Structure formats: structure tokens, C-alpha cells
Image (tube, rainbow, N blue to C red):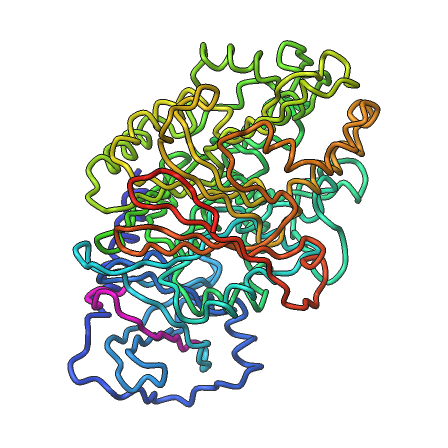
Amino acid sequence: MTTRIHRRDFLRLAVVTVAASAVPLAGCGDTSSAQPVSTDPADVARVFPQGIASGDPSPESVILWTRVEGAAAGDRITYEIALDEAFTQVVARGETSTDADRDHTVRIKPVGLSPYTTYWYRFVGLGVASPIGRTKTAPEPGQDVPVRFAFASCQDFVGRWYHSWRALVERHPDDLDFVVHLGDYVYETDGDPDFQTVGGDRAIKLPDGLPLGDSPESGRAALTLADYRSIYRQYRSDEWLRRAHQLYPFVNVWDDHEFANDSWQDHATHFNEKQGDEKSPAQREAADRAWFENQPADVVFDEAASYPDDIRIYRGLRFGRHVEMFMIDDRYYRDDHLVPEGPADLSVGKFAANSSLGSRNFVLKSGFDEREAAARPTLLGAAQKDWLLGGVAASDATWKILGSGVQLSQMAVDLSSFELLPAQFKAKFYFSCDQWDGYRSERADLLRRLAPGGNLVSIAGDIHAFYASELHVDFDAPSAVPAAVEFVVAGISSASVQEITQATVDSNPTLSALGLGSLVGRFDSILADSNPHNVFANSLANGVAVMTVDRASAIEVEFLQVPPSAVREASWDGAVQVARFRVAGGSNRIQKL
Ligand SMILES: [Fe+2]
């Protein structure tokens, strides 16, 4: 117990000390150093291979991050923050240290910065200067300014390239306030045959790894802290991801793959109950720790505590008079998926044992709804739900943005009109009960209680498609005026939902025999027929999205859509298809422009 208290106190003290050392320096303009500092690109790549990053801006602060390869406890790491890229107007300077115990990562939280101000920052460690990063503090809550931010998700690295980040930084080199990443920033597997392309230049190597099957082609999943740390290092080796971090502060939350596919609490789902329940607390804590070490999020990680007390990532961020962000954690506190993966259960359309089909994916709606109404599982957990309801109700921001890994919108697949299907499949299914559809009673309760405040906008990822939808308390009996709107961003690089579905059907003898393979090509038209609240769907896309909040009058969203074939190649012709949308204040309606 004594050790635990000491460790916690040390962590708090470290934050205070670092912050105190970054109080603005009067008349400071001298950036010279006693030691020669190398800016040779080879040295920079060797000492700062993951570049630099910033995140969670507030009016007076922003987290600054880097990783200094090989730095030990005695090595002095300095940083500077300036009002100009040439560092002639340095406003803060300080020093810190790192070591192998935190995988050589550095995070500092300077205080006393000015609101709504662009800053440049750099580190020096082991005699080498880092790349120069640019960041921006948030406006004061009362400042009447427009806000523009990008949102992104799902950046599988294996066999895939980050042209979507390039599309963003080339089209928006200097007009975003921040970037929201909604999770699946990393994937825990090095070659899951269900969705990853194995081999080639973009392979991921895990030092330890958990085999997902008997053959090498089955792929492996992260198991240890060394695995998770290694994944972040390899993902950040990407030039365009590093450049996005270099230009903009990020606001990160995790989804499932920062720990394990379709995870809930500290449980993985790799084997669909073939090996019993996959409660994996040590693995969960390793994933949390690696996330904290590598993401510039303004949260506290208590290494002496265990799940679920080691970290809390749900949090609010305020950007001027018009925007308040509510970033939620949709994994850490959620109940298990309602239908067990183990036994077959035809009452919910589950025709196979030990499968996600009928449990998490492609679940018979009628059977599920009845069971869900009785069980009322939670996705948020009681404490987070109270925080969200209270925070949105108390917010005086014009627009309340809910950042959710998984989409709120109902995503039904209605096959009832397909005459050739056997009776068992001529029905309405949920595409994924890993999304909010699996927790529909809580969703209804949330929307019912949040809607009266108006101007609630959900942004979500996870599903690997672009969707724009109007949200209803009861999607099966929509009211005249929607409760909120939602914009779902496709993956930066991950296989699109239509491609994954095609591969799933083609590899499943039961589904293939039904002829469902030919229906997958009509994915979006079936979605449109099954989900009248959906205004736009592109299920065969990669890309990134940008939201502009033009004060009180309206928001606009643009989807920057990159073809899925492009992200599988190193070279790219730069082609982007743009879709634009507008939501007038007070309307809860999406207008396609
Ligand atoms: Fe994903």
C-alpha cells in the first residue's frame, strides 16, 4: 500500500513540476544551447522516430508529446514553445526526462498559454532537435469564433497506406483547430485473416504475440506491454500520420482495437468462447498503459491501480462559445454483448456455434429486441452516463458534439423482401450489435433526455463507412423531428465494411449457399431501404471528415472519400471525392449540398 501511495504522489508531483517549469519567461528570446544540437535528418529520424504530437487543447494549455529513442533517466530533455516557427519569440522553456519504464515517451503540460493562439514547439534530447510541431490552444468559452476540426478513425497499418491523412493535410494545411481520432488508432493484430492483408512493406511485428490459430496465416494478437508499445511505434513510423500530428493537436479516444477486437471491459473476444470467457486484465492494463504513453491526451494514468481504476478517458473539451465536445469511452464500462458467442440460438438467427454471427454481427432484430428490452444492457456504465447527461444538460455551448467510437444510428439490414431466401433469413437483422444497436434501450434513454437541449451532433467511426443519419429515440417509429444528427467517418485505411462483409460471406459456406454474396454489391441500396433515417451512405470508402461550426447558424461537414483500392497501394494519384452536408441550427435535419 505504501508503494502505491508513493507512486501516485510521484506522478502528481511530476505533472506539477513540469507545468511550473513552463510558466512564460519574461523577455525570453534566446534559444541557444550550451551543447551543439544536431538537426541532421538522419539524427532526427534516429532519436525521434515517432516525431512529435500535441493534444487536448484548452484555453491555457495543450499536452506536448514526443518519444526519445534510447533516452535514459539521466538524459536531459528540453523543450521550447514559441509564437513563431523560427523560435524568435519563445514563451516557455523547460526540461524533463524519460526512461525505458515509459518506453522513452515524454509528455508535458505547459500552463499559462494564451487562448486561441497558434504555437510552435520542439524538443532537444541526446544532442538532437526534434521536428518542429505546430499546435493551437482552444478559445475561451465565451469567445464567439467559428470552429473547424477533422475527425477520423480506423487506421489499420498492415498492407495499407495512409493516403487519407495526406488528403487531409494537403487540403487543410492550416485551417483546422484540431483533429479528433475516434479510435482504432492501432489494431492489435499483425495479420488477422478476417480483414488484414498479410506481408509486404507494411507488416507489423509483435515481440510476443498471441497466436489466433494453429497456422502462421492465422495471425497473432498483442498480448504483452511490449507488444502494445511496439504497435504504436510502428504505426507512428508513417510519414503522413506523423505530419498530421505535427500540424494539429489531436483529441483521442480509444475504440476496441487499442485493446482487442469487439472488446468489452477487460474481456477480449478473439475466440468466440471456444476457450471460455476471455477476461484478460493484465492485457487490458498493458493496452491502457501503452495508449497513455503514446497519446497526447490530458488524462491521468495510475500505474499502481488496476482496471477499471487505472485510467479514465471520457472527458469534455470546450472550444469557444459554440462547441463543447463530449468524448465518450464505449468499451471500458460496457456490458457484454447480449447474445453469447458460444451456442447456436435460432431465436436471434444464430445458426452457428462459437461465432460472432448471430451474436455481435447479423443478429435477428425481432428476437434481439425482445431480449434487449428485458436485459437493458449498458454501453456507457452508470458513472459515465451520469457525466454525459449532466454535462450536456449543463452546457451553454451552441453545439454539443458527442464523440463516440461506435455509431448511434440504427443499422438494419432488411432481407424480408428477398423471395429466394429461406424463411429463416427473410427478416430484418442488425448489422452489428457491437454498435449502439446492441444497447438500444440506453440509446433511446440518452436521446430522449439529451434531445431537448437541441443541436446535438454525434460523430462516430468503427464501422468503416461514411454515413450521415438523423437520429431518433425510436428508429422504428420516428418522430416528425429527429432527436439529433450523426456523421460517421470511414476508416483512414481499414478495409471498408462492404469489403469485410463480402469476405465474410464468401468464406462462410452457409451464407454463400444462400446467394448472399451477390447481395453485398447492393450494400448501400439495401441499407437505404432498411434505414429511412439514413441520408447518405458510402460503405465502400476510406477517408477522413471535416466539420465546420460557423457560429450559431449552421454546421457543415465534408467527407473526403478515398477509394479503397488506393489505400492498398504505396503510391496514390491524389483522387478524392467530396460529399458535403449542412445542418441548420435547431433543425436536427441533414441537408446534402
Ligand atoms: Fe476499425
Q: Position of residue 66 (x, y in %)?
A: 43, 66
Q: Residue at x 39, y 34 (%)?
A: 308
Q: Is residue 314 left or right of residue 266?
A: left
Could you tell me if residue 325 is visible in this image?
Answer: yes
Given residues 212 and 393, the one toward you in this image is 393
Given residues 516 and 105, the one toward you in this image is 516
Q: Position of residue 435 (x, y in %)?
A: 52, 31
Could you tell me if residue 311 is visible in this image?
Answer: no
Q: Residue at x 22, y 68 (%)?
A: 113
**119 is within the stretch colored magenta:** yes
Q: Position of residue 206 (x, y in %)?
A: 65, 51
Given residues 481 and 31, the one toward you in this image is 481
Q: How many numbered discs, if any?
A: 0
Q: Is residue 420 left or right of residue 380?
A: right
Q: In the displayed structure, would residue 358 be above or below residue 232?
A: above
**Picture quarter with ligand 1:** top right
Q: In the displayed structure, would residue 188 be above or below residue 425?
A: below
**409 is within the stretch colored magenta:** no
Highlighted range, magenta: 110-125
Q: Position of residue 134 (x, y in %)?
A: 38, 72
Q: Which image quadrant: the N terminus?
A: top left
Q: Is residue 428 left or right of residue 388?
A: right
Q: Residue at x 29, y 87 (%)?
A: 88
